[in-house]
Amino acid sequence: MSEKVVIDAMRYWVDDVVIHHNFCPFARFVRHPETIHYQVCQATDVADIMLALHRACVQLDKNAEISTTLLMVPSLHRFDDYLDALSLAQVMIAQWNYEGVYQLASFHPQYEFEGEETASPSHYTNRAPYPTFHLIREADITKAMEGYSDPDSIFEANIERTEALGCSHLQAQLSACIKKAQGDT
C-alpha cells in the first residue's frame, strides 16, 4: 500500500468523519489551515516503530508550525498488537521526557473501548482507516479546553452522535475514506 493512499485516506477521515461529525471540536482549527503532519511508518518491528514515534516528537520540537502529527502504522493491523505498541509508546513518551509536552491519542480500524459492548457505535470515535498514533501538543490542548466548561460533554455528545448514526453508517464512511484515497492514485 502506498504512503499516498494511507495519507489521503486519513485526510478524508479527518474531514469526512472527525470534522464532519464534530468528534473533535478542535480538529478544524488544525486542518484549516493545514497544520497536521501526516507520516506513514512502514516498519513492522516495534523498536523501529518507537524510533519513528521519537522522530515525530523531535520533528514537533523543531517545527512550531506543525500543531499535531498523525503517525500511521499499517503493520499494526491486529488490534492486540496495536495496544501492545501503544502501551510501549506511552512508556517511551515518559522516558523521552515528553510527558506534559505531548499527549498520545490512539486510533485503529478495530478500536474498542474497554468495558463497552463490541457492537457499540461509540468505538467509531476512535476508529480510523489505519492504526494511528496521534501526537498532540499539551499546550494546544490546554488552550483549546479553556473555552469548555465541561470537557466531558464532548465525549457524551460523541456517544449520542455515534448511536444516532449507527455502526453500519460509520463503517461505510471509514471504508469510503479508503476507497476515495485509492481512487486518487
Image: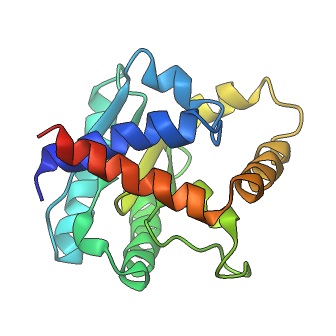
> Does the rendering let one see residue 39?
no
In the displayed structure, does residue 71 sit left or right of residue 87? left
In the displayed structure, does residue 111 sit left or right of residue 61? right
Q: Residue 6 at x, y = what percent? A: 23, 50
Task: Determine the image quadrant of residue 139.
Answer: top right
Furthest residue toward top = 33
Tally the numbered discs.
Answer: 0
Where, quadrant-wise, is the C terminus in this rendering? top left
Q: Residue 102 at x, y = what percent? A: 48, 45
Q: Classify 16 as above or below 161.
A: above
Kindly identify the residue that appears in the image at 35 percent across and 19 percent down: 65
Which of 95/69 is in front?
69
Q: Residue 172 at x, y = what percent? A: 48, 57
In the displayed structure, does residue 77 sit left or right of residue 30? left
Q: Classify 134 as above or below 117.
A: above
Q: Classify 92 as above or below 60.
A: below
Furthest residue toward right = 149
Kindly identify the residue that appears in the image at 22 percent across and 72 percent down: 75
Kindly identify the residue that appears in the image at 85 percent across and 44 percent down: 153
Which of 184/89 is in front?
184
Q: Classify 66 as above or below 95.
A: above
Colour pattern of the rendering: rainbow
Q: Residue 32 at x, y = what percent? A: 45, 17
